[in-house]
Image: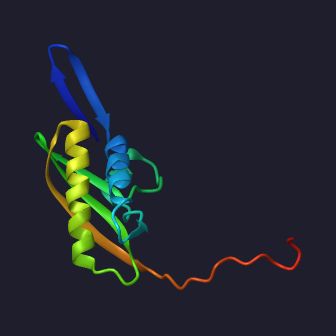
Amino acid sequence: MEISNYSAKGDLIISEEAVSAIATNAAKDVDGVAGFYNRPADVVSTIKKGSLRVMSPVRIVQDGDNLDISIYINIASGKKIQPVAEDVQKVVKEAVQNMTGKFVSKVNVIIASLADEKAPAAEPSETEE
């Protein structure tokens, strides 16, 4: 998918990957977002594109001049889900609108998992110095 804008001065085309990068860069700075989760493969788009490439954590649907964005995130352990999700919605909407000039009608935040803070840190083995 590409976001297109046509004018007398020329054409502007923004790739889905660029909008996805804008959304993830905005969301990663929200307190409580531990990371992202690659969204489940959409069978229809996979067949159309003819590849099984890794899916982005962001899905963008263009409805006329409006954009609907879905973002899959991992929440840090101990954080309240609702405030984190609302912050993600706000910063993603503002960032995409400011950088692309397109109106974002909604931002769906899908909580894919809770990150475990107590994961053991990698320790060097006896052979490492």
Q: Is residue 116 above or below residue 63?
A: below
Q: How many marks?
A: 0
Residue positioned 27% across, 71% down in the render = 84
Q: Which of 115 and 79 is in front in this view?
A: 79
Q: Nearer the viewer, residue 98 or 59?
A: 98
In the image, taking residue 83 as reference, residue 106 lies left or right, namely: left
Q: Identify the residue at the far top of this view.
A: 9
Nearest the eye: 86 or 60: 86
Which quadrant does the N terminus fall into? top left
The answer to whether 9 is drawn above or below residue 80 in the figure is above
Q: Where is residue 115 in the image (x, y as percent from the top left)?
A: 44, 78
Q: Position of residue 17 (x, y in %)?
A: 37, 44
Q: Position of residue 18 (x, y in %)?
A: 36, 41
Q: How is the image coloured?
A: rainbow
| Quadrant assignment, res 99 | top left
Residue 29 horizontal/vertical position (percent): 37, 59
Name the residue located 47 percent from the left edge and 54 percent from the top edge: 52
Q: Which of 127 and 46 is in front in this view?
A: 127
Q: Which quadrant would residue 4 be assigned to in this image?
A: top left
- Residue that appears at 25% across and 56% down: 91
**Direction from residue 52 to residue 19 in the image, left or right:** left
Question: In which quadrant is the C terminus drawn?
Answer: bottom right
Say if 35 sits above or below 103 in the image. Answer: below
User: Does 84 sit above or below residue 4?
Assistant: below
